[in-house]
Amino acid sequence: MKTNTLGQNGPLSSALGLGCMGMSDFYGPADRDESIATIRMAIDSGITLLDTGDFYGMGHNELLLSEALSAVARERYLLSVKFGAQRDPSGAWHGFDGRPAAVKTSLAYSLKRLKVDYIDIYRPARLDPNVPIEETIGAIADMVKAGYVRHIGLSEVGSDTIRRAMTVHPICDLQIEYSLFSRGIEKSVLNTCKELGLAITAYGVLSRGLFDPSWGKTPITPSDFRAYSPRFQGENLQKNLASLDVIRNLAREKNASVPQIAIAWVLGKGSDIFPLIGSRRMATLGDSLKALEIHLSHSEMQMLDEAFPEGVAAGTRYAEPMMSHLDSEKG
């Protein structure tokens, strides 16, 4: 497994991370035993970066990780935890809470569920528009001083917010969606991160399944995020699937899968970009890991860049109510 430092101020991390969200929420039912086996396979394969959120299954994901990692030495993995999303028992969203007291309370619960003494990277899931980012980051900085957090990250925020956060405490990375279908960060945010020495932990690198050749073979359940995602609706879905011919052809030429090419493209954008693979099964994780063996030439990268320019995807990456929470969309 290739490794690199997660930004100028972060820890040494595997080149790929495992995004654990789908094991508990947003993509329909998941198999518990298969999820645990996938987490353990990731560790055995050299993946050290494990990403979760306290609102993934309302604590379920953290408890699942705790069980899967119970026999794994703590120094073998990095826990990246998001907090702040407010949900009710039905799963509905009610904004984000970045108040200092809420920050510290959320951290206390995560430490208990994960059964660890510290979190490697702690980050607000979204910007709370009612709380200055300086106050939120200041509260996490208090927890760094107390030893409960090692590093501070951000998620889905824009350049101005990044700069303001860094006046309070060093930031190691920005977690944000980045894929052939979601290239918005290239307008401004990516350059800001490079300038300030932040890594990018890129989620959604497979565009939530659009790059999966098996997409559409199983029905979407009401609990699946994609049942409401604009990119998976009607004509939008058909247009998006129709645009995949270039990547399919390249995959055939390189004896690779479409997901492997999609991951390799993100890896090819720089050693400071760490794709988070949202595998829920060992088989899909195994396929994704092979992306590390694929080299895309300059001309192949350029061909993909031209085939998937910013704005090529039909439909926004979230429904409008959720898009309004993305500070990153402001640039």
Image (tube, rainbow, N blue to C red):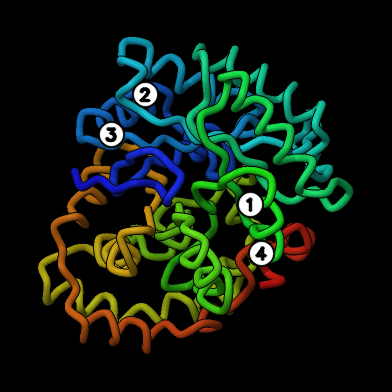
Q: Are marks 4 and 1 in contact (CB under 8 Å)?
A: no
**Image spot of residue 138 (x, y percent):** 73, 37
Disc number lying in front (1 or 3): 1
| Quadrant location of the N terminus in the rendered image | top left
- N-term-proximal mark, 4 vs 3: 3
Label 2 sits on residue? 36
Per the model, the C-alpha gap separating discs 4 and 1 is 13 Å
Residue 202 shows up from this direction: no
**Image spot of residue 130 (x, y percent):** 89, 49
Q: Is residue 284 depicted above or below 255 in this figure?
A: above
What residue do we see at 36% from left, 78% from top? 244
**Image spot of residue 245 (x, y percent):** 31, 82
What amino acid does circle 2 point to?
A: Ile
Label 4 sits on residue? 158
Quadrant of res 28:
top right
Per the model, the C-alpha gap separating discs 4 and 2 is 34 Å
- N-term-proximal mark, 2 vs 1: 2
Q: Is residue 325 depicted above or below 13 in this figure?
A: below
Q: Are marks 4 and 3 in contact (CB under 8 Å)?
A: no
Report crowding for label 1: few under 14, some 14 to 19, many 20 or more residues within 10 A (C-alpha).
some
Report crowding for label 4: few under 14, some 14 to 19, many 20 or more residues within 10 A (C-alpha).
many
Per the model, the C-alpha gap separating discs 2 and 3 is 10 Å
**Image spot of residue 309 (x, y percent):** 46, 85
Per the model, the C-alpha gap separating discs 1 and 3 is 32 Å
What amino acid does circle 3 point to?
A: Ala
What residue do we see at 46% from left, 58% from top? 197
| Quadrant location of the C terminus in the rendered image | bottom right
Q: Which mark is residue 184?
A: none
Label 1 sits on residue? 166
Label 3 sits on residue? 42
